[in-house]
Image (cartoon, rainbow, N blue to C red):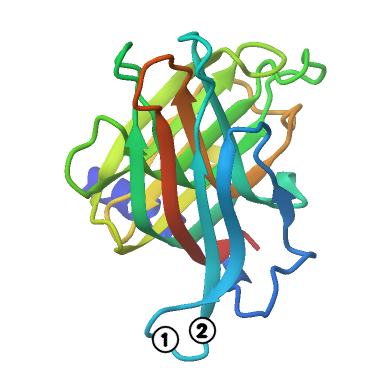
Amino acid sequence: MFVTLVLLAIRSLAAAQNTLYDNFNSALINPDNWVGLEASGPDTREAKREIVPTPGVQNDHRLHLLRRAYSATTDNAGATGDAFGLLFPSPNTVTAVSFTAVVKKGLAAGCSGTSAVSGISAGFAGSFFNPSSSPNGATGDMRAFIAIIRNSTDVGKNLTVSVATFQCNDAICGAQTVLFSQALGVVPSGSSNILGLTWDHPNHRFVFQLNSNAPVVSTYTIGDGFPPASAYKYISLDRAVPRCTSTPRPYAFMDASFDNVFVNP
């Protein structure tokens, strides 16, 4: 009985009455709702960010994001990664979000010479809190994401919905400690899926959900009394491509859409 009550409470939290933030049924991206998130380096060769009609639905529109990115071919040292999409202009007010995402196509090729993996994802990510009132840059920031992912090691056309929470270990969050990660399920390319992430501050936990599946909970023991030093929340296509001297050249590509973004009241 206790387990049932706990599960019902979690379901109630995950299904809380968030409010519609943007359904993208406008001619242009609403500049009051969003700030442009631009790829930080020269590796992106193709990119689109636009409002488009929803296929098969009259008088309905959605956000379309597309990008193809590469990396340096001068050496095999590490990888480059960044995000392309839209930022929430007031990130610290957003503690819960859900949205509909469709990945029409996701492709990735890794480095054949080093077996390093490429990956790209469509989803939501953000920073939520910091245990310190005066951190060194992003050091200590707690971050979380939920995303539909395609890696170069994947076979077939299916995609994986994954979540994670992690803490930044340095001022630029180049080093991180992953506190929780889990795959929520596999979804077909072209399928419509609802993804949700909630920071349940009073109970010191994150709640993740894919469609109507049972919510997945990640609790933490880190102090959460201060805002993140590097505050952000966004929906995006996020990629990581290894630097590689081998051919064929590694890359990551994704064509995706977002719709019906809901946030906490």
Dot label at residue 60:
2
In the rendered view, tell whether residue 232 sits above or below residue 16. Answer: above
Dot label at residue 57:
1
Image coordinates of residue 76 in percent, x first then y, are 45, 10
Who's the residue at 68% across and 34% down the image? Answer: 40
Image coordinates of residue 140 in percent, x first then y, are 65, 17
Q: Is residue 62 left or right of residue 228?
A: left
- Closer to us: 41 or 122: 41
C-beta proximity under 8 Å, tags 1 and 2: yes
Q: CA distance from mark 1 to mark 2?
A: 6 Å
Q: Can residue 93 be seen in the rendering of this structure?
A: no
Who's the residue at 44% across and 58% down the image? Answer: 256
Q: Can residue 82 be seen in the rendering of this structure?
A: yes
- Closer to us: 85 or 233: 85
What's the residue type where badge 2 is placed?
A: Asp
- Closer to us: 4 or 80: 80
Q: Secondary structure at mark 2?
A: loop
Image coordinates of residue 242 in percent, x first then y, are 45, 21
What's the residue type where badge 1 is placed?
A: Val
Who's the residue at 74% across and 18% down the image? Answer: 132
Task: Give residue 183's quadrant in the image.
Answer: top left
Q: Is residue 38 left or right of residue 9?
A: right
